Image (tube, coloured by chain):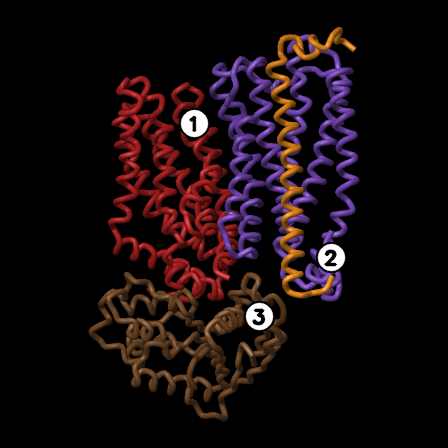
Chain colours: A red, B orange, C purple, D brown
Amino acid sequence: MMQGGLAGAVFGLIQRDLLLTWRRRADIATTLLFFVIVATLFPLGVGPEPAVLRTIAPGVLWIAALLSCFLSLGRLFATDYQDGTLEQMLLTPHPLAALVLGKIAAHWLVSGLPVVVLSPLIGLQFGLSGGAIAILTFSLLLGTPTLSLVGSIGAALTLGIRGGNLLSALLVLPLFIPVLIFGAGAVASSESGMGAEGHLSLLGACVVLAIPFAPWATAAALRIAVE
Amino acid sequence: MQWNSLNEFLAMGGYGVYVWPSFGVTALCMIWEVLILRRRHAAARTALNQSVASAGVAL
Amino acid sequence: MKTDRMNWFQWSSPQAFYPLAGKLIPWFACVSMVCLAAGLYMGFLVAPTDFQQGDSYRIIFVHVPAAWMSMFLYVVMAGWAAVGLGLKARPSFMMAQAIAPTGALFTFLALFTGAFWGKPTWGAWWVWDARLTSELILLFQYAGVMLLHASIDDLRRADRASAVLALVGVVNVPIIYFSVRWWNTLHQGASISVTAAPKMAATMLAAMGIMALGFWMYSAAVTLLRVRCIILERERHASWVQIERVS
Amino acid sequence: MLDIHDLSCHRGDRKLFGQVSVSVPVGRLLSIEGSNGSGKTTLLRAICGLTPPDQGTIRWHGRSITEQRETFTSGLIYIGHRIGLKDDLTPMENIQAAMQMSGHPVTTALARAALEAIGVEPVCYRLPTRVLSEGQQRRVALARLWCSDQPLWVLDEPFTALDARSSQLLRERLQRQVERGGIVVAATHQAIGLDPSTVQQLRLGE
């Protein structure tokens, strides 16, 4: 696998990040376990009433996914920043936004995708029907990339700040709201017979909007952080 | 003018408890902001003039 | 081209800006006080009682202008931030930094007075309405911009990082507004429909407009006052501050 | 040809250096000297385009580096204070990942040859970089200099933590770079020991 040019650099970066995550498998496990535990806390908190659980399930799963995505965002650029590979990334002839997009893709593959894969199981725990589970999983598949994209802006802005992780929560969580609304709303809307297409297409619109915009903003934030 | 007495004006047709706190808090916040900024400006000026004086620059 | 930019830099230097701001403040303050007095007079003494809401509606004379200012100031702040990022001009960043607290204050006031209006009108202090929710998120975003600026020691980085955040926020607020509206239509019946604006008398509208103008001028005066503080605090080592006696 | 004209940098309120002007023709090494905190690292980062200076311009072959970022960075190797190695990757993987990202992918054989050339022991090739000593890690980072032929090298304290033999290898490599018409900019505490006719000096903090 040896390729020059932009595609080579981006795929090389994705490959490198995946390899690095593989060498630190425990980190993914932590994120996933966090997702499961947060989702488990809700029935314990609100009581095991099946009707109630069915109603809150989409929201709970989405908030758990949002928090676990956010938890892993802290690592997105932090180690690169500390060991100097981020500087090297800025000094390549390639557009920084493209490399950033590569890193975000790698982040989604190891933090967003496992959550999507695991969500049907949690959905079952909450007593969701097969159709609802399918829509919920699909909404997560469509929405979690936006979380990684938008979250990267906050991760880049708070790079190297004391208490930066907590601060980036404050910066990033308000940006997650539209995704949360459309994602969790998809299931509720299909349950009420209105169909989930509207919500799902808006989720798609979010990701389409975020793909060009977020890496660009993140790249600007990274340049500011490194100088 | 629809108010016949001061009491009627203060009662605001029974909504005085909602109307006056709204206006009161708004006014307090705005006045407080101005006061705080004037203090901050004065402090910045004093600090500056002291540092200039200690540096021995003639004004 | 190069010399033009140099001139622009000289004109927009903190040194030139500081006395200019000082001269402008009294004017804005006067206009603001006149407008606020006139607005209060019209709002309380001229405007009639609303036949639906009674006198509780008078809260909108602060609530609506505060809400307008909160959004307007955010856009202005983001505008200064964009100018700062584009031209690398320090006074633009100082303006953005000076606007944020006033914007946050008006956001808080809009929420506070909104609650006091909502309680008699809808029977609840808080409704998950699109406008209220976006206003709350706006407050979070103001807080984010200010906290980010405060947590970065290096001023140049703080300026630019919070400018990027302010710009991202400008995109976010309308998206949130529409997404909450969309979300609300789905949950219809759970809350009272609050989108229908009550028909307003001309005097009510005029009073609201004058109050808004007063708040606007107030914001200008306060922002300039704050920017003067910021200039003095930041430029204390610059030679012009040391040599000229600052007033 | 690297032209630095009237460069000034601040850190917070403190002025690091001002009005630095120097021209480095091809085939020269610019050695930047100065005490700790004199702004050597900041100057190097400014030359790379990482830290925009407060004032002044940097030109590479007559054009400002900000106007030709792509061309400029594709001909640049920067090895900074943070050496840019991932702890969890082996030296081989590190070199290949770094070169791939910078747009000059290298084969395994070439990466191995580069590591051999700076004297990294073959036993280290398959270990994660974090278990190597500091000197070994620095050598792995420097191995990039043997991988390709970028014309401009910017090195921050390249001799730090190197033993005598590795220092000699690096010195020879730098000499070859200037002989074939490249430019090296290096911040150092001590004299580099290259052929004096190819070395230019710049002292900061005076």
SS at mark 3? loop
Same chain for the residues under marks 2 and 1 in the image: no
Instruction: List x then y, in percent, for residue C217.
Output: 73, 36
Chain holding disc 1: A
Q: Is residue B56 left or right of residue C127?
A: right
Amino acid identity at mark 3: Ile
The residue that mark 3 highlights is D65
Query: Residue, x 41% and y 76% (percent of image)?
Result: D157
User: At 51% across and 44% down in the image, what residue appears?
Assistant: C147
Regarding mark 1 in the picture, which secondary structure is present there?
helix
What secondary structure is marked by label 2?
loop
Q: Could you tell me which residue is drawn at 38 percent across and 51 percent down?
A: A76
Which of the 4 image quarters holds residue C205? top right
Q: Position of residue D147 (x, y in %)?
A: 37, 76
Q: Looking at the image, do the residues carrying marks 2 and 1 touch, with CB atoms under 8 Å apart?
A: no
**Left or right of A106: which side holds C198?**
right
C-alpha separation, residue under disc 3 versus residue under disc 2: 41 Å
The label number, if any, that marks residue A185 in the structure image: 1
Binning the other alpha carbons within 10 Å of mark 2 as few (below 14), some (14 to 19) or many (20 upward) gives few
Chain bearing tag 2 is C
Label 3 marks a residue whose chain is: D
Report which residue position mark 2 lands on: C245
Q: Are marks 3 and 2 on the same chain?
A: no
D195 w.r.t. A35: above or below: below
Residue C177 to residue A21: above or below: above
Q: CA distance from mark 3 to mark 1?
A: 50 Å
* Amino acid tagged 1: Gly
